[in-house]
Amino acid sequence: MLQRVRAQLRRVADQMMRRPELCCGAILLSCALILPITLTCGRVKDVVSPARPPVGFFAAEAPVVDLFLGQMEEAERLLEEADISLLFYYAPWCAHSITARQQVQETARRLAGEVQFVAVNCWWHQGKCRKQKSFFQYPVIHLYFWRFGPIEYRGPVQSEYLESFILRVSTPLTYLPTRSALHTFLTHQQAVVGYFQFNSSPQPAGFISFLLSALHALRRDHQGAVRFAVVTNQAVAEAISLSEDESVYLHRHLNSSLVFPRAQRNLTAQAVCDWVFENRESVIHWIQPTGAKSYSLEAELQKGPALLTFLPHNPLTANQLLNQVTDVALRYHSCCGFEDGASAIPLCCQSLLVSGSSGEERVCEVCVSRSAPDSPCWALGVYMEQLQLSSAACRSVLSSYSRFSQVSVCCRSAPRPQLCPLDSITGLQCRTNKTLRFLLLDAELHWPLARRLGASGNHSGQPFITIINLRDETHYVLKHTDSLEDFIQNFSVSFSPLHRHLMGHKQHQQHTQPLIQEVTSDSFLDTVMDSQTDVLLLYYSAWCGFCSLLNHVFLQLARLFQGNSALMVARVNVGHNDLPWEFMVDHLPSVLFFPRHRKQMSVKFPENTPMTVPNLLRFVLQHTSHAPWAEPGTGAESASLLWAELHSLQREVFSLHRARERLTQRLAVLTPDSQNAEQRAQIGRLEMLYREKRHQLADGLHKLQELADASEEMLKENALLKVLLSGLRETDRQEADRQEADRQQGKCEAS
């Protein structure tokens, strides 16, 4: 093999020695290949520079340990040294991280003595955080409580909300030393109470599991809707019927309270947390949409009608408005109330619609005092038909045919049912098909959303309450003069007296009447539904490109009908104005014609027809009211009168022409000497009348020409008008020729 290679090399060397130009060419080609490669490699070293090392993200005076090199080992060491720690994972380029930095610094300044704040740059490619963590968004906030964690915070990165969450994590359990504290805690919270005796040992075995269950609940629900408390006094525990050590009690306002089943489940942290979330009551929900296009609010509204309350909320202080809304929500969902008295026997109520003797419908509320705790409320329907519900006042009926002890009946006229002995809003959820869900939003964070829903003003100092029903496409806004109870009651009745709220821009007052009337939500019914006016309405939007192309068409059409009070050309921006659902269209642009006296018979412009001035004009004339051009006081009346005047003048001109011909024949028979003064006077009168009629005919032609010039497109489409104009011009020319010929003939005869 080597010998063959050597032989080939000798052969190539001999050829190159024989041909020196071939050797020079090979050398030049090698240099041409080596030189670019050398320059390229050297240039890459100069262009690609190493990334700049990161710098501190937080201010140097801020009480935050900033690990801007992504040192996860240092962060883990700091977690072991502190009882409560907050880890803030950030990316230096992230706008959300930059916005949250100031909020974290403010929280750290207030809680620096209790909580350790650590920030880690998780974007630096050489740091261990980037290699160990795989976050899909920034920033990420984790809390650790005695090495338990991470508990991720997913709420708004505001200093008040963040501090409230940290305080809940740092104190997951509330100690209740007295019955008064227990009663207050159960009244205002969704409460879970654990009873543990600390007499036998420094720390009961189940206490740690109960403490961890509270942390698990915060990990599952960062808002902390369920609060955990602990009782160590047996006398206090007996107030909620707890006597056994290591018992967990779930308090519920609407249904019977529960005790953790120790016989079926082990007392572990995860088991207690799962049991609480399976059996808790949710009568009011805090929602926090992440942005303008967030699907979280839409998902809640899809579940049914919802009452949205925008409150000026501060999680660190008590809110009286929040307590009022919570009280209304509890009474609304409270289908089983309590009788007055010391016995406190639970009630079950159900409504029934009956007809009285006079045909008036009444809503009767039947409330049954349950003698046994397990008496089912649905059994009311079996006995309600047997009751005589004719009394207009509340009465009691003794029952001997069921295990129920007593039945209380109360009848009221529909549609405002009243519950006896409870108030009208209590138990309303069980007496209506429009079951409301109560949703709370922070007005400070979501005031732009409130303004889109109908809130007025630029500040969020006042609460804003609205009801949205997506299924019925209805939207109601609570007025400042009304109460929340009446607002809910009016929504729940069969025929609601509430008026649907329509969002729309306010119409600016204009000094001059525009060619095209701009319609808004407030002026739609008064303008479009006016029974004395035909309305041609254009549906458009700012984002519709085809709509802007039709502006010149509608302006040209509006000029044709300018001054006509019987027809209006209007348009409505459906992107900024809500309309009743029966007047909406399925696509843009769309044109609807609303004829006067027949507004319910509106007609849509055909979609397959081009929107041109002749087509729109033909569409209007085809569907307008009967004889629209004959009513006095309209601009179309002048056109009708003009046509009648032209026909009348034409007949008079023809009659005058025939009279002149007859007179000419008579004059031809007579000699010039026999013409007396009376005949000459008659000829003068005829000439004067002829000139007057011709002048009137010329004025009519001029008016008709002005009317025809108003729209060249209409003249092109109306062949009859062209023929008429040409015929009138030809008649005028012939009459002029004949008059000139008669004058010449008269001169000849006179001479």
Image (tube, rainbow, N blue to C red):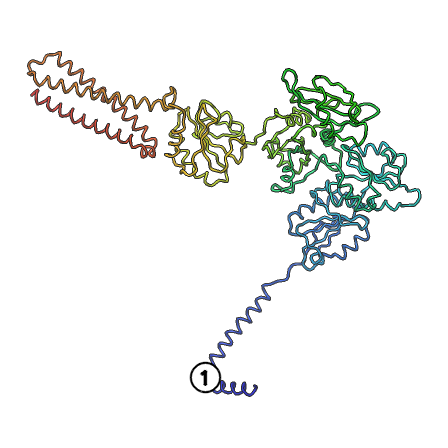
Residue identified by numbered label 1 = 20
Q: Write down the quadrant of residue 246 in the picture.
A: top right
Q: Write down the quadrant of residue 172 in the picture.
A: top right
Looking at the rendered structure, the secondary structure element under dot 1 is helix
Relative to the observer, which residue lies in front, 471 or 656? 471
- Residue 435 in picture, x, y percent from top left: 67, 31
Q: How many marks?
A: 1
Does the rendering let one see residue 63?
no
Relative to the observer, which residue lies in front, 546 or 595? 595
- Residue 392 in picture, x, y percent from top left: 70, 17
Q: Residue at x 50, y 35 (%)?
A: 585
- Residue 93 in picture, x, y percent from top left: 64, 52
Q: Point out the residue furthest to the right here.
A: 200
- Which quadrant of the rendered structure holds the C terminus? top left
Q: Point out the residue furthest to the front here.
A: 401
- Residue 351 in picture, x, y percent from top left: 69, 25
249 is higher (above) or lower (below) than 509: below
Does the rendering let one see residue 717?
yes
Relative to the observer, which residue lies in front, 432 or 470? 432
Q: Write down the quadrant of residue 419 in the picture.
A: top right
- Which quadrant of the rendered structure holds the N terminus? bottom right
Q: Residue at x 77, y 19 (%)?
A: 396
Q: Identify residue type, mark 1.
A: Pro
26 is higher (above) or lower (below) than 454: below
Image position of 562 (left or right of 694): right
Image position of 549 (left or right of 333): left
Image position of 122 (left or right of 723): right
For mark 1, does the 10 Å Cα neighbourhood hold few (<14), some (14 to 19), or many (20 or more) residues?
A: few
